[in-house]
Image: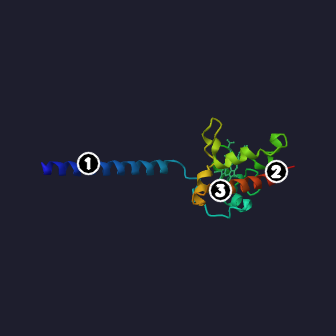
Amino acid sequence: MRLRIFCLVVLVLFAVTLAFTASLTTQTSAAQQSKPQITHVPAVYTDPSSGSAMFHAYCASCHGNDGKGDGPAAPALKNLPADLTHLAAKNSARFPELQVAQAIRGDWMTTAHGNKEMPVWGPVFLYLAHHDPAIAQLRVRNLTKYVESMQKK
Ligand code: HEC
C-alpha cells in the first residue's frame, strides 16, 4: 500500500515537471517567433521630483527627447507614439492634465480606446516607490507637468 502511494507521488511529480518543461519550451519558441525589435529593460531609478529626468528615462525612447513622437523605438510600434507637444492645441488650448496623468498611470489601457503599446507606468512607479502611493503619485504629477511644459503655443 505504502509503495503504491509512493509510486503515485513520483508519477504526479514527474507529470508536473513535464508540464512545466513543456510550458517553458512553448514560451521560448513563441519568443523566438516574434521579431525581437524592442528590448524591455527594467525601469531605472530616477529622481521622482524631476519630470525631465523621468521623461528622458521612461518616455523618450518612444515619444522622442522633445516629445514629438519620433523616439528610436517608434518605428517598431504598430501605432505611432502620440506627439505630446500638441495635446493642448488639440484640446481647445487647454492642457488635458487628467487625461495625461491617466495615460501615464495606464488607467485607460483596459478601456475600449486603450492601447497596449504604451507601457503602463502606475505599477512601475509604485514598485520604484516601495509601494508608497504618495511618491508614485508625485512621479505622475511631475511627469504630467513636464509634458505640459512641452506644449507648443
Ligand atoms: C513603448 C513606447 C512608449 C513609451 C515608452 C511611452 N509611450 Fe506614451 N504612447 C505610446 C503610444 C504608441 C501612444 C499612442 C496610444 C494611442 O494613441 O492609442 C502613446 C500615448 C501617450 C499619451 C496619450 C496622448 C493622447 O493623445 O492623449 C500620453 C500622454 C503619453 N503617451 C505619455 C507618455 C509618457 C509621459 C511616457 C513616459 C512615462 C510614455 N508615454 C512612454 C508609446 C509609448
Q: Mark 3 near mark 2, Cβ–Cβ under 8 Å?
A: no
Give the residue drawn at x 74%, y 58%: 65
Residue behind mark 2: 151
Give the Cα distance between marks 3 and 1.
47 Å
Q: Amino acid at mark 3?
A: Ala
Q: Position of residue 26 (x, y in %)?
A: 41, 47
To which quarter of the image does residue 87 belong? top right
Mark 3 Cβ inside 8 Å of ligand 1: no
Identify the secondary structure beneath mark 1. helix
Residue 59 coordinates in the image, percent (x, y): 68, 55
107 horizontally vs 35: left or right: right
Say which residue label 1 marks: 12
Give percent across and percent down for residue 127. 57, 57
How many numbered dots are placed on residues in this image?
3
Confirm or deny contact between disc 3 and disc 1 (CB under 8 A).
no
Q: Earlier in the sequence, mark 2 or mark 1?
A: 1
| Colour mode of the rendering | rainbow
Indicate if the residue with disc 1 has its beta carbon within 8 Å of ligand 1: no
- Name the front one of labels 3 and 2: 3
Q: Is residue 71 left or right of residue 9?
A: right
Which tag, 3 or 1, sits closer to the chain's start? 1
Residue mark closest to the camera, 3 vs 1: 3
Label 3 packing within 10 angstroms: few (<14), some (14-19), many (20+): few
The residue indicated by pointer 3 is 134
Q: Is residue 44 above or below residue 25?
A: below
Amino acid found under the numbered disc labelled 2? Gln
